[in-house]
Each structure stands twice: as C-alpha cells, then as structure tokens.
Image (cartoon, rainbow, N blue to C red):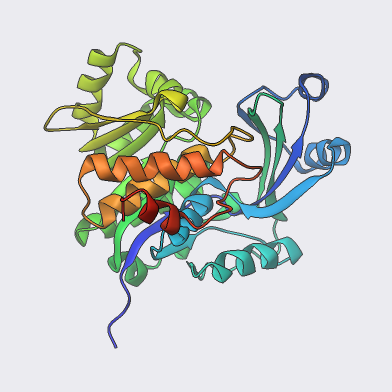
Amino acid sequence: MPEHRLDVIGVGNAIVDVLAKADDAFLAAHDIPKGGMILIDEARAHKIYAAMGAGVEISGGSAANTVACIASLGGSGGFVGKVADDTLGEIFRHDLRALGVEYETAPLKGGPATGRCLINVTPDAQRSMSTFLGAAGFAGSDDIDKAQIKRAAIIFFEGYLFEPLIAREAFVHACDIAQANGVRTALTLSDAGVVERQGAGLIDFIRDHIDILLANEHEAEALFGSSDSAALGEAARKMCSLTAVTHSERGSELIPRDGAVVPIKPAPPDRVVDTTGAGDAYAAGLLFGLARGFALDRAGALGSLAASEVISHFGARPDRPLKTLAEKAGLL
C-alpha cells in the first residue's frame, strides 16, 4: 500500500494554550504588551497563570494550530515539535493525533517542562501572549524525518521557533531535504518582534530557503522596511516566489514573484470574539489550497474563510468543520 501524501507538515512550538479573558489593567499589572507576544521564564509563567481568570486549556502553538485547521478542511497534515515527557506533553500528543495529524517527535527527557502560552484576551478581541517555551525550544535536526518530508506537498515553519539556534539548524536541515525532493517551503513571520530581533539572519534564511512567506502588515513592514504597497511588493518579489500579507478586517493580498498582486476579500465573521489563531487559520486555508493546486484567489479565499471562523469564538481552533463551511461557500 503506498504511503499517504501529506498536504502540509508544520514545524513549530509544541505548547499548550491557556486562554482567559482580561482587561487592560491586568496587562499593565503584569507588564504584558497588548496584542503581542513575549517570552517568559517558568517562574513568571506560574505567577501570571495564578493571577489569570477562569479559561480554557488546549494543545496549541502556531504551526500546530495551522495543521489542526488543515485537518478540519479535510486535509492531511503532520507536525514536528518538542514536548517534555510529562502530563501536558502527553495531552498535547493525544490532542493532535486525535485530529488525524501525524505526530511522532520523541519527547524531551531530563529537560524543562512542556511549554505553555498564557493568552489574555481583552474585550476588543486582542490577544496578548506570554510564552514559556520550555521543551518546545529543544526541537532539533534529529527530530526531522526525511521520509515524512518527502511525502509532503509543503513544509511550513513557525517564525517563533526560528529564534533558538538548535531549532534554526533544524529548519535549515528540513529545507535542504525539502528542496532536494521538490517539496515547497513556507514560513510565517509570527511576530514583528521576531523580525526585529533576528534581522539579517532571518532575511538570509528566507532568501535562501523559503518559497512561500506569510506575514501580517506589521510584520511585513518590519521585514521589508516600508509600508508603501508598491515598495513592499517589489521587495517581496525579490525575496520569495509568493508572499501573503494579511490586513485584518481589510482582507489580504498575495504577491507572486511573476504576475499582478491578487487581492483577497475578507470573509466577515458573525462576530469577533477572539483573534487568537486568526493568522494560523489563514495560513491553513492558503497552504491547503496551494498544496491541492488551487488558483491563488481560491486558496486565499479559503484562508479568509478559515480565519473568519476562528475569530468568531473563544480559542484558536475551529468550532465548526472548515470543510463543511468551505463546501457551502463553493470553495471545495
């Protein structure tokens, strides 16, 4: 029996998301920047967690959320990311596999605990994240499975995980395998702070290894050094075969190296409750469409639809099957 082809393999932080409602005073009291992401140590993670209101806990992480959404679209996905050999790690593994996602990364033993992201959501639906990476930052080249990559259409990297050196080396190793086997590579920038901290190293990695780049407008401005659409588009074409830039409620645009910019309309949600995971869901729809050979406008529309569903409720993963919604919208 032939091996099953994977639409997308995600490589990213394997962490448990803890989501709770908060107000601006809570963010100020704990020195959490609104709408962004900061890295914290284990002691601070315990302190913030103890002060948070009642919420929900679910296996998360940006790339893992994307692969979960691909599964909801009816696609096939794999994930590479490190958890510890502890209870949270086992919960993470079970949750992802229950969705039908291939996840075989060996757990970390004798190191820090499984990572967690403390997400405080304010009434304006902005999510402010405080992340203890824990074991997640120890994903390395030994965790990359050449045979798995060869079965994929696209391998997708999470920008947050570019920062630990061991994980960056794993990114390059995986890209070398992908490029030698005709597998497209994709990267989400994750946060403007990643761009600002990593600078030239990140730019070189993208130019040398990435086919498809995903960014929101703030991340794109930080990377390309301009908010002017013409200048940004010119810089994007020089860097990647395809760049996707999201503009929240104004939709997104796809910038191919050859050809005109493809504007993508937003899919208005019933209501905006929590923007956690919006970019992850958009990436899922876009990458799933590209993996299946869809035209750019159709792939982008899938991204908008997935993002719209995710922001309409609390939590970073879909409540309703994305495949059903996409079929109803005539996209599948």
Q: Position of residue 98 (x, y in %)?
A: 58, 70
Taking depth in this image into account, of 114 and 291 the one nearest to the observer is: 291
Which residue is situated farthest in the left direction here? Answer: 258
What residue do we see at 76% from left, 23% from top?
A: 27
Q: Position of residue 235 (x, y in %)?
A: 24, 22
What residue do we see at 27% from left, 83% from top?
A: 2
Instruction: Please tell me in which quadrant of the rendered image residue 183 appears.
Output: bottom left
Horizontally, is 183 left or right of 313 in the view?
Answer: left
What residue do we see at 66% from left, 23% from top?
A: 124
What residue do we see at 24% from left, 37% from top?
A: 242
Taking depth in this image into account, of 234 and 123 the one nearest to the observer is: 123
Taking depth in this image into account, of 231 and 126 the one nearest to the observer is: 126
Which residue is situated farthest in the right direction here? Answer: 50
Which residue is situated farthest in the bottom direction here? Answer: 1
Q: Position of residue 244 (x, y in %)?
A: 32, 34
Q: Quadrant of the C terminus?
A: bottom left
Taking depth in this image into account, of 174 and 322 the one nearest to the observer is: 322
Above-or-below relation of 117 to 220: below
Report if residue 76 is visible in the image.
yes
Q: Quadrant of the N terminus?
A: bottom left
Report if residue 144 is visible in the image.
no
Q: Position of residue 110 (x, y in %)?
A: 71, 63
Horizontally, is 161 left or right of 131 in the view?
Answer: left
Above-or-below relation of 202 to 294: above
Above-or-below relation of 94 to 23: below
Tell how many labels. Answer: 0
Instruction: Please tell me in which quadrant of the rendered image residue 82 appears.
Output: bottom right
